[in-house]
Amino acid sequence: MTAPKAKNIDKTALYIWDDTNKEFIAWDGVLTTGDIEIGAVELKDGDSDVRADIELDSTKNALYIQSETLATEAKQDDTITAIGNIASPEAIYPVGSGSNGSVTLTDAATAYAVPATASTEKHVLVLYNGSDTDIYWGFANSNSNGLLLPPDGKASMNMGVSQQVYAYCASAGKAITYSYKEIA
């Protein structure tokens, strides 16, 4: 069927066909509608033609997507079991023997081992400077260029087997406190 010829058409306006009155009418740019019904909407994988299975919820008329592979009770149980088997707390935290003590830096400008004897196991070492003077620490036995541990300063580190830390202070008679715990 061919649309009838429009009468009195302004060439700058947009006209639409009025199927009720069987004529073209100038459109004012306003789209007036009621409810819009959409049918056959698809959600699909961008890499293939696999479509999502969408169903209506039976109580709220809401859409939901059900997965047989992601959120099943068995999958959740498997995940919980896997998390539980990663490691026990004993495998993560230090649980071996340990020691607390202090080393007095008797002579000024002399490096002292802290603790005096290195552990024969991997361990966590915590140093505390309770003195009123800067103390320097490091892994070499001359620490004038070591790492600063200011008064009330703390340092902690993971140590390897037989690793030793040394402390150095420019003032005599200062003490450094330590605590270590072996990692089983």
Image (tube, rainbow, N blue to C red):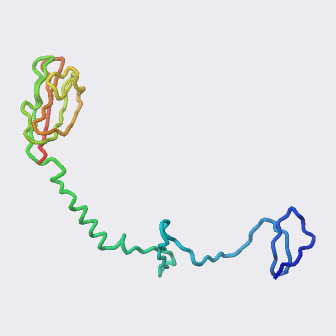
Image check: 80 left or right of 109? right
Instruction: Residue 161: name its quadrant.
Output: top left
Q: Is residue 49 above or below residue 137?
A: below
Q: Residue furthest right?
A: 8
Q: Is 10 on the left-hand or right-hand side of 153?
A: right
Number of dots carrying numbers: 0
Query: Which is nearer the eye, 7 or 71?
Result: 7
Q: Residue at x 13, y 37 (%)?
A: 179
Judge by depth and name the residue closer to the eye, 34 or 18.
18
Residue displayed at 57% across by 78% down: 40
Q: Vertical placement of 176 versus 125: above or below?
A: above
Work out which quarter of the rendered image holds the N terminus and state it: bottom right
Q: Quadrant of residue 99?
A: top left
Q: Say above or below: 148 vs 63.
A: above
Where is residue 78 shown, x and y percent of the image?
27, 68
Q: Is residue 114 left or right of residue 35?
A: left
Residue 114 is situated, as x and y percent measured from the top left of the image, at 12, 30
Image point 47% across, 79% down: which residue? 57
User: What is the quadrant of residue 13 in the picture?
Assistant: bottom right
Q: Position of residue 60 (x, y in %)?
A: 50, 78
The percent position of residue 34, horizontal first and vertical second, equals 69, 75
**Which residue is painted at 16% across and 26% down in the image?**
140
